[in-house]
């Protein structure tokens, strides 16, 4: 798989030139990985990006790790404060119009940069990250495949008497053994707990002979995540009400996902799903947004909600995840992740 971080960097450098900025300070682990293709902690490096050059200020021990990006980064080992070294490098090259994103800086670093006269560029890189590059799409597809295959392995193993925590552990192991870097979330709910959108799995709640089950899970693969939710009835005595809301949620998901294409208003995704659920009389029990983008983070922009601004674009990767939650009884959520194209979308998590 080709790493095209260099192309992302070049595109961002064009943005800096058009914005008449001399440079941008990268502070967050997400931005460091996005532009270098290398997993770095926020305490391990600071990047200074200019319209022509890219500098990595890092610790001496981290220099070998930057080797894959040495072709398009000037790597400097500094003995002390990396942020101070980045500002000093900017001064040496007479770069005066500098910017940073306050959303990616902790308070102390943000204050230091503001005092140094840097302007605020809020969400600039986050906006760029909405449209996925080819290598990102490949990584997300692999992450989605890992999660989907893990579920197919684990579901037949789920038996009456197992705890929510038992199933959570099985899912985590199934994803890790398939190559996942980590498991950022792994929700397992039985019965009444399915009405708790982000329930924490319990060692005490055991699966009954007849019970609702909801699992919301995903993994990181080389920094990129997946997101899937499955709901079903365990046992042979499925209540009519559960069957009813499951089919309503399925229709809502189909209505929303069927609209996905470049140019579609983001708010229209939420409206399509919400209209189905509200028309069926369950509007008050649909208590969250319809979806979000995924990538280096589990929840990225755009968020599919009423009032959302903007349109979907080609190569966005978004979830569709409507749900109905009946407190004290059960809940249903169904979710898949989709790659948006000019004419439609591709379901990346379909079993």
Image: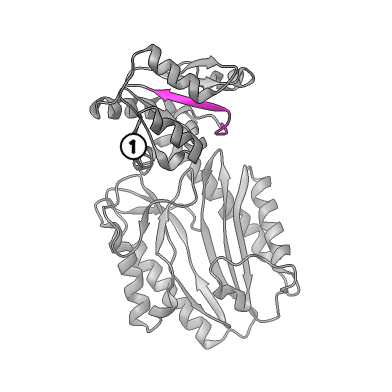
Query: Is 46 included in the stretch rendered in magenta?
Result: yes
Q: Which residue is mark 1?
A: 121
Residue lying at the far bottom in this picture: please name it: 240
On the rendered structure, is 321 left or right of 94? right
Query: Is 108 included in the stretch rendered in magenta?
Result: no
Image quarter for residue 221? top right
* Residue drawn where x is 46% and y is 45% of the image: 295
* Residue drawn where x is 42% and y is 23% of the image: 48
User: In the image, is residue 108 above or below residue 256?
Assistant: above
Q: Which residues are magenta?
A: 40-49
User: In the image, is residue 216 above or below residue 50?
Assistant: below
* Residue drawn where x is 55% and y is 75% of the image: 195
Q: Nearer the viewer, residue 136 or 90?
A: 90
> Is there any visible trace of residue 34 in the rendered image?
no
Q: How many numbered callouts?
A: 1
> Is there any visible trace of residue 103 in the rendered image?
yes
* Residue drawn where x is 70% and y is 79% of the image: 208
């Amino acid at each position: 798989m080709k790493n095209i971080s260099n192309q992302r960097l070049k595109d961002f450098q064009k943005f800096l030139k058009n914005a008449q900025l001399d440079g941008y300070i990268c502070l967050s682990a997400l931005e460091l990985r996005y532009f270098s293709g290398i997993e770095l902690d926020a305490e391990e490096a600071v990047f200074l990006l200019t319209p022509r050059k890219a500098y990595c200020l890092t610790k001496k021990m981290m220099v070998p790790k930057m080797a894959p990006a040495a072709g398009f980064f000037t790597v400097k080992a500094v003995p002390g404060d990396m942020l101070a070294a980045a500002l000093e490098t900017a001064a040496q090259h007479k770069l005066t119009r500098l910017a940073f994103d306050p959303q990616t800086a902790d308070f102390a670093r943000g204050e230091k940069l503001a005092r140094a006269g840097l302007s605020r560029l809020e969400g600039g890189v986050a906006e760029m990250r909405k449209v996925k590059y080819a290598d990102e799409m490949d990584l997300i597809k692999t992450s989605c495949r890992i999660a989907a295959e893990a579920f197919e392995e684990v579901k037949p193993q789920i038996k009456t008497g197992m705890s929510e925590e038992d199933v959570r552990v099985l899912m985590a192991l199934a994803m890790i053994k398939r190559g996942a870097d980590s498991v950022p979330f792994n929700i397992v709910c039985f019965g009444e707990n399915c009405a708790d959108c982000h329930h924490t799995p319990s060692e005490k709640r055991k699966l009954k002979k007849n019970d609702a089950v909801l699992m919301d899970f995903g993994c990181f693969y080389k920094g990129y995540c997946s997101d899937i939710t499955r709901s079903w009835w365990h046992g042979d005595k499925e209540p009519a009400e559960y069957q009813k809301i499951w089919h309503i949620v399925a229709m809502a998901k189909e209505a929303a996902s069927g609209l996905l294409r470049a140019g579609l208003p983001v708010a229209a995704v939420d409206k399509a799903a919400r209209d189905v659920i509200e028309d069926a009389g369950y509007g008050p029990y649909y208590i969250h947004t319809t979806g979000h983008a995924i990538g280096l983070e589990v929840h990225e922009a755009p968020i599919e909600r009423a009032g959302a601004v903007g349109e979907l674009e080609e190569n966005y990767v978004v979830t569709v995840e409507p749900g109905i939650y009946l407190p004290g009884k059960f809940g249903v959520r169904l979710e898949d992740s989709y790659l948006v194209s000019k004419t439609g979308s591709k379901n990346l998590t379909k079993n």
